[in-house]
Image (tube, rainbow, N blue to C red):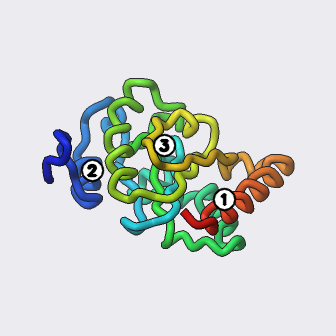
Amino acid sequence: MQLQDGWLFMSLEEISIQVQNCKKCRLWQTAQHGVPGEGPADAKIMIVGQNPGAEEDQTGRPFVGRAGKFLTKTLAEYGIKREDVFITNIVKHTSPENRKPYDDEVAACVPYLNQQIAIIKPKVVVLLGASAKETPRVPGIEYFEIVHPSAAMRFTKMREKFRAQITELVKRIQQPN
């Protein structure tokens, strides 16, 4: 850990350890694992969801369930490899019955997310679904909202919109800075 501009600055590995041991809100009590996120520290794209689901809680890895597999497959169809993207959530522990995280739970986790964004400095932060839209914005980073992959899997119109949004994302990341 380092002090930078008056803030305690952690590496991605230190954030991961902090998340695994975090007890800043009630969610750790019913979770098996913290899910800090994964991907390269120099990713151009960072994907942010709401919170880990059951499979993510079991494995400690983000977006490994049905929606994650659909996301990975769809991104690959557009030439984006999962291993080139940093994937995480606003909240780092699963919530009971996958409910929307409460404001105090989000507030407890947002510093981790903000540090991850500051370290990675992605060209684009992709926000999945309505809840992720509430992610605090870091100046100098482009944010791009898309349909959550679980909605795209269930509804044809949402799937079409999701694919159109992925097409737009590809255009944005191909543009020079």
Q: Which residue is drawn at 63% across and 55% down?
A: 67
Q: Which mark is residue 51?
A: 3
Farthest residue, direction front: 177
Farthest residue, direction top: 103
Callout 3 crowding tier (Cα within 10 Å): few <14, some 14–19, many ≥20: many
Between label 3 and label 1, give the one nearer the viewer: 1
Residue 33 is at least partly visible in this image: no
Horizontal and vertical percent position of residue 95: 45, 36
Name the amino acid type tagged 3.
Asn
From mark 2 to mark 3, how far is it between C-alphas?
Answer: 15 Å
Q: Which residue is drawn at 46% across and 58% down?
A: 122
Q: Which mark is residue 20?
A: 2
Tell which circle, 3 or 1, labels the residue nearer the N-terminal end.
Answer: 3
Residue 152 is at least partly visible in this image: yes
Horizontal and vertical percent position of residue 89: 46, 47
Callout 2 crowding tier (Cα within 10 Å): few <14, some 14–19, many ≥20: some
Relative vertical location of residue 54 with respect to residue 171 in this rendering, above or below: above
Tell which circle, 2 or 1, labels the residue nearer the N-terminal end.
Answer: 2
Horizontal and vertical percent position of residue 7: 20, 41
Q: Residue 169 carries which label?
A: 1
- Local SS, label 1: helix
Name the amino acid type tagged 1.
Leu
Between 52 and 86, which is closer to the camera in this rendering? 86
Q: Is residue 153 left or right of residue 100?
A: right
Q: Which residue is drawn at 56% across and 46% down?
A: 143
Horizontal and vertical percent position of residue 108: 33, 32
Q: In this view, does 8 lie to the left or right of 12?
A: left
